[in-house]
């Protein structure tokens, strides 16, 4: 069995339909735990929510690492903000510092011919990194090529369970991009839902940001497609 984690259902909505014999085992309706098969391999998809606290709690609650059937590996894919100036929108990062070396080498060999493939460090932060200036500062401080909010919380749970992990991120917003609205208006860490009322009120007061937000949301489709395509290529080879 392979466990695959995503933060949000937005990231997995192209991948889940590719699973055969799919069924929902539990979790919240918008952050479910889903079981299926892919090429004869049993796959368990766990949606973690956004942020380290939710990620750790939901992975533990799912029983994915502590059940009677021990997974042979865990894949931790998702979107990531670009920090390295050479990473473009929808590029793929194989994460060195949170991945099992053998799985990382196998993934790199499998995807060697892919354009826009990078290998490097990821940093997991407690808040959304919103501006190009903040991304540049974090890149200089950490040396990381991308940023997320969950991977650092997943890794110690895998280590404790003796399950090797491979982390990978598709770049949703590159280093030169400043988010059109503050991160706390895109996702509420407490409720683990988009704060639609607060976002709507913000946009009423800042109507010039509406177009930029629409473009950002539309730009996620190729990122999600790249992430899904990468997973479909990797899973049979791992």
Image: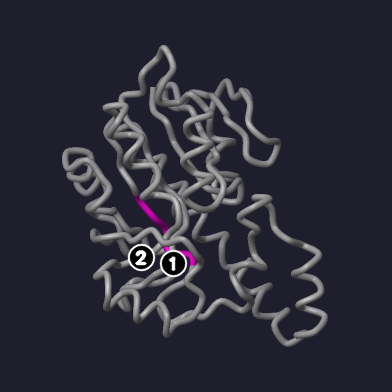
In the displayed structure, does residue 108 sit left or right of residue 192? left
Task: Residue 16: name its quadrant.
Answer: top right
Q: What range of the chain is rendered magenta?
A: 168-172
Identified at 57% across, 29% down, the residue is: 34
Question: Callout 2: helix, strand or loop?
Answer: strand
165, 233: nearer the viewer: 165
Task: Residue 68: name its quadrant.
Answer: top left
Q: Residues within 10 Å of mark 1 (few under 14, many from 20)?
A: many
**Is any atom of residue 238 visible in this view?**
no
Image quarter (top left, top right, bottom left or bottom right) of the C terminus: top left
In the displayed structure, does residue 8 sit left or right of residue 69? right
According to the image, label 1 marks what residue? 81
SS majority, magenta: strand
In contact (CB < 8 Å): disc 1 and disc 2: yes
Where is residue 90 shown, x and y percent of the image?
A: 44, 64
Q: Is residue 36 above or below residue 152?
A: above
Identified at 54% across, 52% down, the residue is: 50
Task: Residue 12: name its quadrant.
Answer: top right
Question: Callout 1: helix, strand or loop?
Answer: strand
According to the image, label 2 marks what residue? 146
In the displayed structure, does residue 103 sit left or right of residue 44? left
86, 33: nearer the viewer: 33
Identified at 52% across, 54% down, the residue is: 224
Q: Residue furthest top?
A: 68
């Amino acid at each position: 069995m392979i466990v695959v984690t995503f933060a949000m259902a937005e990231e997995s909505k192209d991948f889940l339909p590719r699973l055969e014999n799919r069924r929902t085992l539990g979790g919240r309706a918008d952050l479910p735990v889903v079981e299926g098969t892919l090429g004869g391999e049993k796959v368990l998809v766990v949606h973690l929510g956004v942020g380290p606290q939710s990620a750790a709690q939901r992975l533990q609650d799912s029983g994915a690492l502590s059940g009677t059937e021990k997974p042979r590996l865990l894949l931790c894919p998702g979107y990531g903000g670009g920090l390295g100036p050479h990473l473009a929108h929808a590029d793929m990062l194989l994460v060195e510092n949170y991945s099992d070396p053998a799985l990382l080498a196998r993934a790199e060999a499998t995807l060697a011919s892919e354009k826009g493939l990078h290998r490097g460090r990821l940093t997991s932060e407690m808040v959304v990194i919103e501006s190009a200036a903040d991304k540049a500062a974090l890149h200089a401080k950490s040396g990381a090529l991308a940023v997320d909010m969950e991977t650092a919380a997943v890794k110690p749970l895998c280590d404790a369970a003796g399950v090797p992990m491979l982390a990978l991120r598709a770049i949703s917003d590159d280093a030169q991009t400043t988010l059109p609205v503050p991160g706390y208006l895109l996702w509420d860490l407490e409720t683990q839902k988009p704060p639609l009322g607060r976002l709507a009120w913000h946009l009423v007061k800042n109507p010039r940001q509406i177009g930029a937000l629409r473009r950002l949301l539309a730009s996620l489709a190729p990122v999600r497609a790249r992430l899904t395509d990468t997973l479909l290529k990797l899973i049979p080879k791992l």
